[in-house]
Amino acid sequence: MSTHAAELGSNYLTNGFSLKSWLLTKDHKRIAILYMISITFFFILGGLFAFAVRLELLTPAGDLMEADTYNRMFTMHGVVMIFFFLIPSIPAVLGNFLVPLMVGAKDLAFPKINLASWYVYNLAGIITLGAIFMGGVDTGWTFYTPFSTTYSNSYVVLTVVGLFINGFSSIFTGLNFIVTIHRMRAPGLTWFRLPLFIWGHYATSLIIMLGTPVIAITLALLAAERSLHLGIFDPALGGDPILFQHLFWFYSHPAVYIMILPSMGVISEIISAFARQKVFGYHFVAFASIAIAILGFLVWGHHLFVSGQSVYAGLVFSVLSMLVGVPSAVKVFNWTATMFKGSISRETPMLYALGFIGLFTIGGLTGVMLATLGFDVHVHDTYFVVAHFHYIMVGGAIMGYLGGIHFWWPKMTGRLYPEFWSKLSAGLVFIGFNLTFFPQFVLGYLGMPRRYWSYPDEFQVLNVLSTAGATVLGVGYVMPLFYLTYSLAFGRAAGDNPWGAYGLEWETTSPPPTENFHHQPVVTGEAYDYPSLEAKSV
């Protein structure tokens, strides 16, 4: 194994130890680490809000907190988790660290804008935290009008100002990725030699650039309506509250793909590395990312099936929503085919990848069910919907994030983590997640509405199971904080390529030098050019 990692002064971590050297850095790898620290804080905060919600639902009566407090808890859970963890997590942390390395560049195209994106993210977080500490917001993370504009007595304007500013952070990151991928690829790295992680981030960046301005305008209109009573969404003043839902979901449904496409990119890298196989149907998987990005903008109307829109409009959105399942299924089938006859090793990242495939498949299939008009009317705004989007956004996005963190942790730090504890954590996350959210499919089908403070006694058993699962899930999520931190001081040196993986990021040192590569890399082979098993057996 290489000893590069042990050479002090030769990597980005040891290139300056002062606080100033970190806070003013323009190195994409250090900015990724800064993002990781900020995002971990918001993940813990959002998790605490979620646990408070599950504790309240442990008993049928609303006996832990007042109804108004409960409304604020689930709203702040949604706001923090979606806007400050799920959307930025993989692009801001793994994307920032890996995109330049994977394309053979020294940095992102606009390093100063990259640093600015982290400051903007934290500024937005501070403003939103201010709203939380002043009493929070109770509208649900969807901010539906006219409640949010007229009737809510919580801190709506301050919260949406925080989210408005946060959008610029996403735009800065997306812009950087698009320009870097177009203009800074290493010699020989053609579009169809790019890792699928890069394709996932490219498609995500397109959604960010096209969709984020829409939600920013929508939130600005909401704040203006609430402050100035302009009559944009208020029917009493000639406005249309359904207009808000159209604008909100035009961005927020594609936002689901902002969360899941980077995760899919991570899974492609992990499965290929631990199955020792080329990704089956590489071109189909790459184009599926673009197809998901395009179709994602055409399906917002399935959130409005019960809003009074015409049946014909509902049918069109129903069909379009089902079409999104096609490129998603292509990816799942191709990952499965990649593993077929592969030499699979069950390291921790692979456990997360396998968990992702299972949970994402359940989330995807229930998404097809919800795209069906009649079924959606039956379970609309019930716990079935809650379970579905948690299987996609938590089961999919967070499994991908954790899988990616474990996969590239040796590259980021030069250290290996304790395998026993990481596998135990992965197992607890998978078991705890299913115990938390699968009972909610049943609860929703039986008719338990979401966002209710209390419920009939017959729903308690399933709610107790869900809260028990949340406890197990919480333990699984907390464990990496300890063993990954432990590995920084006591972990074994990782070497440059501990997994024997294929890709430019594995050809530099662990941790990488500040300039990423000591010499300009030149790409001469295809992506995932692992020797075939037949060739190795000869």
Image (cartoon, rainbow, N blue to C red):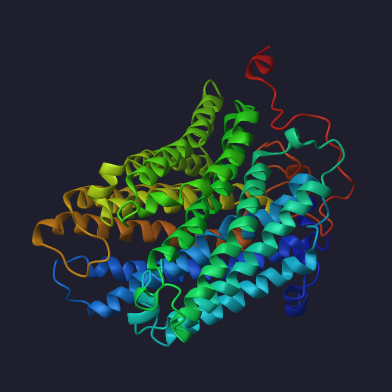
Q: What quarter of the picture does the N terminus occupy?
A: top right
Query: Would residue 403 be found to the left or right of residue 187 on screen?
Result: left
| Residue 414 visible here | no
Residue furthest out toward the front:
238
Q: Quadrant of residue 536?
A: top right
Nearest the camera: 296 or 474? 296
Assign the C terminus to one quadrant of the image: top right
Residue found at x 73% / y 43%: 506
Residue sticking out furthest to the left: 457
Image x and y of residue 95, in percent: 66, 54
Residue at x 72% of width, y 32% of height: 527
Q: Check the image and report above or below for 98 versus 360.
A: below
Q: Looking at the image, which is closer to me, 298 or 69?
A: 298
Q: Is residue 307 above or below residue 222?
A: above
Taking the view exactly as shown, the residue that stands out farthest to the top is 538
Residue under the image location 78 percent in, 57 percent down: 108
Residue at the extreme bottom of the image, as rendered:
134
Front-most of residues 292 and 29: 292
Residue 240 image offset from top left, x and y in percent: 40, 68
Asked if residue 75 is positioned above or below residue 535 in the image, the reply reads below
Question: Measuring 36% from the left and 73% from the top, which residue is drawn there?
Answer: 235
Q: Quadrant of residue 320?
A: top left
- Asked whether the viewer can see residue 202, the reply is yes
Q: How many marks?
A: 0
Q: Nearer the viewer, residue 122 or 43?
A: 122
Question: Residue 89: x percent and y percent?
Answer: 56, 59
